[in-house]
Amino acid sequence: MSMQDRLDDLVEAIEEQFEEAEIEFSLERALGEVSLEVDKADWSKAALLLRNHADLAFEQLIDLCAVDYLTYGQGEWNTADAPNTGFGRGVNAIVTPPGVAEADQERRFAVVCHLLSLKHNIRLRLKTFCAGDTLIVDSLTPVWNCADWFEREAFDLFGILFDGHPDLRRILTDYGFVGHPLRKDFPLSGHVEMRYDADKGRVIYEPVSIEPRTLVPRTLRSDSRYAQRSVEHEDA
Amino acid sequence: MPEIRNYTLNFGPQHPSAHGVLRLVLELDGEQVVRADPHIGLLHRGTEKLAETKPFNQSIGYMDRLDYVSMMCNEHGYVLAIEKLLGIEAPIRAQYIRTMFDEITRILNHLMWLGTHALDVGAMTMFLYCFRDREDLMDCYEAVSGARLHATYYRPGGVYRDLPDQMPRYEEKASRWHSADDIKRRNVNREGSLLDFIEDFCQRFDGYVDEYETLLTDNRIWKQRTVDIGVVTPQRAKQLGFTGPMLRGSGIAWDLRKKQPYAAYNEVDFDIPVGKNGDTYDRYLVRVEELRQSNRIIKQCVAWLRANSGPVMIDDHKVAPPSRTQMKEDMEALIHHFKLFTEGYCPPPGEVYAAVEAPKGEFGVYLVADGANKPYRMKVRAPGFPHLAAMDEMVRGHMLSDVTTVIGTMDVVFGEIDR
């Protein structure tokens, strides 16, 4: 059975089972992959269904991560109109206007899982969005035990809390680290630098002394060739 | 009666058998491990954050530095994700070159694992044997990319350049350290092309694997240290997110090269070894058999690459740079070159996940693009991460000395776990 047929079966099974279990969902099929989005409230229920039902049988959680959509679609380079003189296309580094950020906060953070069914040899992307102040999502540790460290990582790097997680500690960053480094409003160079202070005889932390700079500006271009290509890809 | 309390032991991060920078906090009851709490992140470099600030192509080099003993497999995962996003495919010759180098990488990785794992358990000789044989393969890396470890050889749309016709040789002149005869002996298998050199290695390699097996497979001490240590049942292996030899060691026949073939894997013949008991010894047997199977794949790739020539990079200058000659003669090629290296290419908005069967398990890259020349979000799914997360479960109830055995059998490398 080809991958396309298997994807067809998967989409069919999901639509059937999720309607039966009365879970709201939206499906997206692009680039030969299926993405399933569910509401935060249905997160663990959906996960359990995806693991347990024989037609779905996603026995393995391959990956779990978070995405911060704060600056999605924003560039640092003006591609719309060119000035007549000089090197003037650079626009200010990405800062989100306060109004925009608040309006879009509902969908700022996504938690994304990649599931694998060994039985059906198929993959699925499962995701949910969470809102600004209460970044709490149900933990998937009871469903897939390996979610443990992946959720610790998502907590560490993005500050998303997982309800029901057995041991939600930081995992990758330093002991006593402040902030969530993979958020888009966290600077690349961080907030503090550390060095050994000979006078005090210990390692000290200081505010960073390096200026943030952009080597290659972030440029957005809509290229119709690729749009065409991805359509062909889907047909293949 | 005196009060008996558990003893907490700090293992690493500078312990030689912690394979890098693992800090393990062990709670011991006598010599028995009650709880193991791995502290990771001592090698965290923020690869994912860095990738968000660079055009797509500039992050390929970072992939080498993730799992720094299986460099090209990491590149392969990343490059596949970009290709999927752009909807392009590498030419067939590039696919075979990638397959061949993926398998060379697998041998490199497994030799590293075998040498250090055996060393941890107490077999010094293995380490010397394995590192002797890694040398030749790293010379292949060097011949093709100029770097022995961090190759940056795979590019979206193919590979950086075709295989060289002349294998680099040792300098002919005798020196204080090497006599003329010595140099002549070292250059014997370097007379021809890179493919000749690889073929020569393949001929020898099965014999090498026999040597390793003579030293370990029926070795009484090796078996005492590995049989029934760190047993994982198939159900637990799935729950714990195991992939690669860790999953196959538990008896599940799952290999992306067979199940979801990429590159030229559906064109070559090979078998997937599967374990029975899910213990350290079975995982050892699986990996050793993988060495033989990799050798088999390389031989087939060499034969194919000898018989078929062709381009190794797609002919699309929006993604791949034009040749130097074209650039000097053609204005448009010059513009393409300039745009590609100053700005890069802008894939359409979308998200993809691409995975390859890296030596340690499934190495996946999740890319979110918003139409810019840099990834919006890049997540690396490192195989070692869930493996190490199972540390607690695997060592619980074992003796302290088995902790190093279990670290060894997981084949952890902190470059990929900490990212």
Image: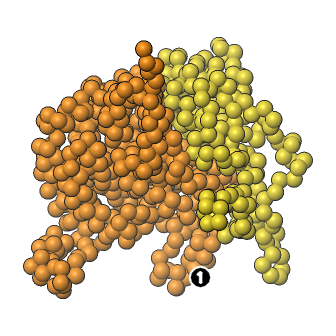
Chain colours: A yellow, B orange
User: Which residue appears farthest toward the left when viewing the image?
Assistant: B181
Q: Is residue B105 left or right of residue B224?
A: right
Which residue is found at the position 47% from the left and 82% from the top? B325
Q: Is residue A38 left or right of residue B83?
A: right
Position of residue B94 relative to residue A106, above or below, is: below
The amino acid type of the residue labelled 1 equals Met
* Residue B398 percent coordinates (x, y): 34, 27
Rendering quarter of residue B307:
bottom left
Q: Secondary structure at mark 1?
A: helix
Q: Quadrant of the N terminus of chain B?
A: top left
Which residue is found at the position 51% from the left and 26% from the top? A145
Q: Is residue A115 left or right of residue B206?
A: right
User: Which residue appears farthest toward the front when viewing the image?
Assistant: B1
- What residue is shown with label 1? B331
Nearer to the camera, B368 or A2: B368
Which residue is found at the position 66% from the left and 47% from the top? A177
- The subunit letter for the residue under badge 1 reads B
Rendering quarter of residue A15:
top right
